[in-house]
Amino acid sequence: MAGSAAATPDQPFHARSISLPSRTHPVALRVEDELHKLKTAAPSMWWSTEKMCSGLRGVGDLYNSVGDLLRLPSLEQRAVFSSAQKKRLEEELEISVVLLDLVDNMKDVLVAMKDHVEDLRLALRRRGNKITLGKERRHALIGKELQKSVNRCCKASKQMDERCGSFETLDRDSDLSMVIRVLIESRDITLSVLRSVLHLLSTPWQSQKGRRWSIISKAMQKRKVACDGTHELSFDSSLRCILNKDVDDDRILQAQEQLMAAEDTIEALETGLQSLLRRLIQCRVSFLNILSLN
């Protein structure tokens, strides 16, 4: 991944600390518990697709709880904002659109990657003399376009992080300010989870260096299958099996299994992003309802 927009595991998640005034309310307690679980799990998501998918589900659950918090009658009835609070609400509302676009674009990248994996699987089944340089060029072109899409998502993530404000100046005794702080911290942890996914999506077309494993190598850790005798695999290893006429049936089968594992991982991530997208939209609707009361 090019440029400073790329997310790396060496960039730790700096968790902000909030204290919810309405600690006795079940919804507030649930939000605090879900935030704590996600912050604890965030570092391990860089190296485990299973935990990455779990993180996406956790973020979706978090926003479901945040939506419940926004719909509390006590909050809606007392939604009288100071000028500072209204400004922060409008900023958060604007940033929520950027977050929605980011998740939607990442989902589109996964759909394109899944289609490409299916193309490679079909090519493996149809291996023959006509599988030539054209297939390799198409693979390289698709990889280049998908990498551009991932880079755009990373850039959007970085820009959104730079726009995020601090809640340190907010009145901590206000329920509305508490909600704003929850929104800020929820966005922080969401960006951390999404960056781990973006890091994963950036690797299939890169040379493997150190700990930067590809989507296939991560998916195959349980199956322990390797086409080239290494756990650092990429889509390119399957392409080599397609282009090489001397590859035996066992290696073709291994390549098929690798692609199936990659497809399973992509589908799991796609499902997680789709669920998160729905929860973000629902949360934004509740957010708009509160803003319309003032």
Image: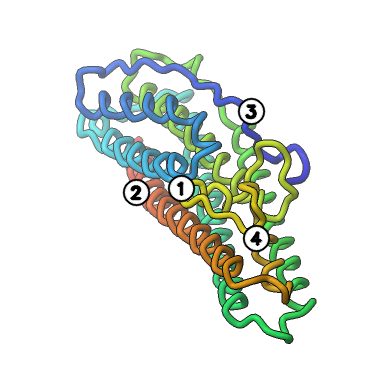
Name which quarter of the figure residue 73 lies in: top left
Marked residue nearer the N-terminal end (4 or 2): 4
What is the C-alpha distance between the residues marked 3 and 2?
Answer: 30 Å
- The residue to which callout 4 is attached is 235
Marked residue nearer the N-terminal end (3 or 2): 3
Mark 4 or 2, which is nearer the eye? 4
Circles 3 and 2 in contact, beta carbons < 8 Å: no
Give percent across and percent down for residue 209. 73, 40
- The residue to which callout 2 is attached is 282
Name which quarter of the figure residue 274 lies in: bottom left
Between 243 and 158, the one lying in front of the other is 243
Q: Residue at x 33, y 24 (%)?
A: 32
- Give the SS element for disc 3: loop
Give percent across and percent down for residue 207. 75, 49
Marked residue nearer the N-terminal end (4 or 3): 3
- The residue to which callout 1 is attached is 222
Q: Which amino acid does label 1 sit on?
A: Lys
- The residue to which callout 3 is attached is 11
Would residue 86 be visible to someone looking at this image? no
Q: Which amino acid does label 4 sit on?
A: Phe
Marked residue nearer the N-terminal end (4 or 1): 1
Q: Which residue is drawn at 31% across and 40% down?
A: 67
Marked residue nearer the N-terminal end (1 or 3): 3
Decide: few, some or many residues near mark 3? Use Cα within 10 Å; few <14, some 14-19, many ≥20. few
